[in-house]
Amino acid sequence: MAFDADALTCSVTRVTRPDTLMIRTVVPQLQSKCTVYMRLAGVDVKPGVMPRVLDWLEVHGHFGLYQLDHCDWLRDEYGRLLGDLADRVTGDTLAGHLIKEGLAFSNPSHVQQVMAALLTSAEPEE
């Protein structure tokens, strides 16, 4: 997979949990940069793999940038963007790497779980 000039790119500002990263990217709808928290979509990450996530980011960041693969700007119940990061040259993804190394499990119903949590959550009364 070669670099896709039309794909969104992002930089990673901070890794707060093994499955949650603070990223900075351009939001086309706003035509400006935005900093958001992103949760890896479709995986359940084992605890204690933070060093491996940091290693992947160090090896696969080309000039500090990654390709951002997001789920139509869908947010989870905590407001985190659902998505994944990919190496801009090889196309390897962070979630794919974690699954391949046995550090995470695939969760194909993750998006449905997020939608169910959003639909069943109570809104505060005014």
Image: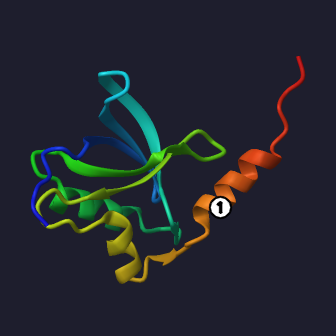
- Residue at the outermost top position: 126
Residue at 46 percent of width and 40 percent of height: 37
Q: Identify whether 30 is placed above or below 20.
A: above
Q: Foreground: 105 or 51?
A: 105
Q: Quadrant of the C terminus?
A: top right
Q: Which residue is mark 1?
A: 112
Quadrant of the snapshot with the N terminus? bottom left
Q: Position of residue 62 (x, y in %)?
A: 11, 51
Q: How many marks?
A: 1
Image color mode: rainbow
At x 37%, y 26%, the residue is: 29
Asked if residue 62 lies left or right of residue 72, the reply is: left
Image coordinates of residue 32 in percent, x first then y, are 30, 21
| Residue depicted at x 63% and y 42% | 78
Identify the residue shown where x is 60% and y is 47%: 76
10 shown above or below 99: above
Res 51 quadrant in image: bottom left
The foreground one among 56 and 48 is: 56
Say few, some or many: other residues with alpha carbon within 10 Å of mark 1 (under 14 / 14 to 19 / 20 or more): few
Instruction: Where is residue 38? Give x, y as percent.
Output: 45, 46
Compared with 107, 85 (above or below) is above
Q: Secondary structure at mark 1?
A: helix
At label 1, which amino acid type do we have? Gln
- Against 77, is 91 above or below? below
Quadrant assignment, res 36 = top left
Residue 3 image offset from top left, x and y in percent: 11, 55
